[in-house]
Image (cartoon, grey):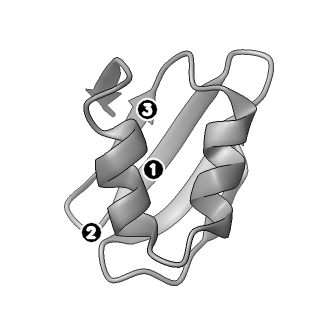
């Protein structure tokens, strides 16, 4: 999965696989895969002014995830 570095105090890089709807987020303390994430949520994250706030509000407690 291609990862893009992002400007954020909490997130390091973000990747998205459309066929599986898997969102991968690399934080300073680890990397997580989030499952069944619609592409509009990924786009919202990438366009958010605060990626950490967007993650906390729309992703963190809304999708299954695992640390990789």
> Along the horizontal axis of the image, is 29 left or right of 58?
left
Question: Decide: marks 2, 1 in contact (CB < 8 A)?
Answer: no
What distance separates the C-alpha of mark 3 from that of mark 1? 7 Å
Q: Position of residue 57 (x, y in %)?
A: 33, 48
Disc 3 secondary structure class: strand
> Along the horizontal axis of the image, is 16 left or right of 59?
right
Q: Position of residue 47 (x, y in %)?
A: 67, 67
**Quarter assignment of residue 11:** bottom left
Q: Position of residue 5 (x, y in %)?
A: 60, 73
Q: At 61% across and 40% down in the image, what residue appears?
A: 41
Instruction: Give the residue furthest to the front.
Output: 57
| Residue bearing the label numbered 1 | 25
Disc 1 secondary structure class: strand
Q: At 33% across and 24% down in the image, what residue appears?
A: 65
| Residue bearing the label numbered 2 | 28
Q: Position of residue 66 (x, y in %)?
A: 30, 25
Q: At 52% across and 64% down in the image, what residue appears?
A: 13
N-terminal of the pair, mark 2 or mark 3, is 2
């Amino acid at each position: 999965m291609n990862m893009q570095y992002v400007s954020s105090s909490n997130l390091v890089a973000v990747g998205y696989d459309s066929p599986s709807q898997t969102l991968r987020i690399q934080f300073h303390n680890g990397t997580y895969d989030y499952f069944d994430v619609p592409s509009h949520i990924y786009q919202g994250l990438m366009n958010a002014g605060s990626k950490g706030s967007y993650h906390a509000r729309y992703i963190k407690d809304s999708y299954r995830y695992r640390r990789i």
